[in-house]
Image: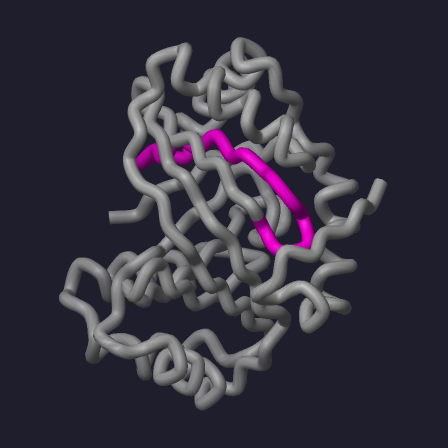
Amino acid sequence: MKTYEVEIKSLLGSEDRADNFRSLIQEKGAVFVSTGKQLNHYFINGNLLKMKELLFPYFEKAQQESLEYIISHGEHFSVRVRNADGTVLIVVKATTGDNTSENGIARMEFEEQVSLNIDELDKLLLDADFQYQAKWSRTRETYTYDDITITLDRNAGYGWLTEFELVVSEESEVQDAQERIKETMESFGVEELDQERLSRMFDYYNKNWREYYGTDNIFNIE
């Protein structure tokens, strides 16, 4: 089944701001879900059809159809591999408009576990002619607030960042989901991270990721 991920980020930056935000999450009654560490490997270029052929043997029919739909209907693809506390996933995101798939607010998303380790899944994508764009590391706390997922991340390079996310099944629901998220963020006292600034941060990290991946080093890009 196809889904649309509607997600808005806010940059907290410092440990103190993250602690204050965490306290507010608890005060408002958000439910703690999990905490853990993640590795995310981003890929660029590549052959999507070849990737599909190599991935299909690992998926059931419904998963195959979902991946096929995104490849057939999406634009501005983002392909990444994630290791979340030992669970390895392939993540393919795409837009149907002008937003980038890396940082856009509304995206189609395919995220499924694969019975490979992260190095094996990396190799599969490299065999499909993809190249590494960057490798990212982070710790993530996940909460739910009504049907909104709130994550609190400490990303290598970025520092502390929070994301508010709703997943909807129809493109017609995206606008309403954006408005709900923005209203919720306002009630939490956090502001949307400007998309142009986020793009500058993303570009800087991609050029310098070896200085940050797996470390606590951060930078500040206005």
Q: Residue furthest right?
A: 222
Looking at the image, is 200 positioned above or below residue 174? below
Drawn side of residue 21 relative to residue 15, left or right: left
* Residue 91: percent from left, percent from top: 40, 60
**Residue ID at (31%, 36%):** 169
Q: Quadrant of the C terminus?
A: top right
Q: Quadrant of residue 85?
A: bottom left
Which residues lie in the magenta part?
Answer: 155-171
- Residue 135 magenta-drawn? no
**Residue ID at (82%, 46%):** 221
* Residue 203: percent from left, percent from top: 75, 58
Looking at the image, is 44 positioned above or below residue 105? below
**Residue ID at (37%, 50%):** 36
Q: Residue furthest bottom?
A: 127
Drawn side of residue 174 relative to residue 98, left or right: left
* Residue 73: percent from left, percent from top: 44, 56
* Residue 12: percent from left, percent from top: 65, 32
**Residue ID at (58%, 58%):** 76
Drawn side of residue 63 relative to residue 49, left or right: left
Using the image as rendered, state which of residue 107 and residue 125 is in the foreground: 125
Residue 72 in sight: no
Protein image colouring: one colour
- Residue 159 magenta-drawn? yes
Main SS category, magenta section: strand
Using the image as rendered, state which of residue 54 and residue 38 is in the foreground: 38
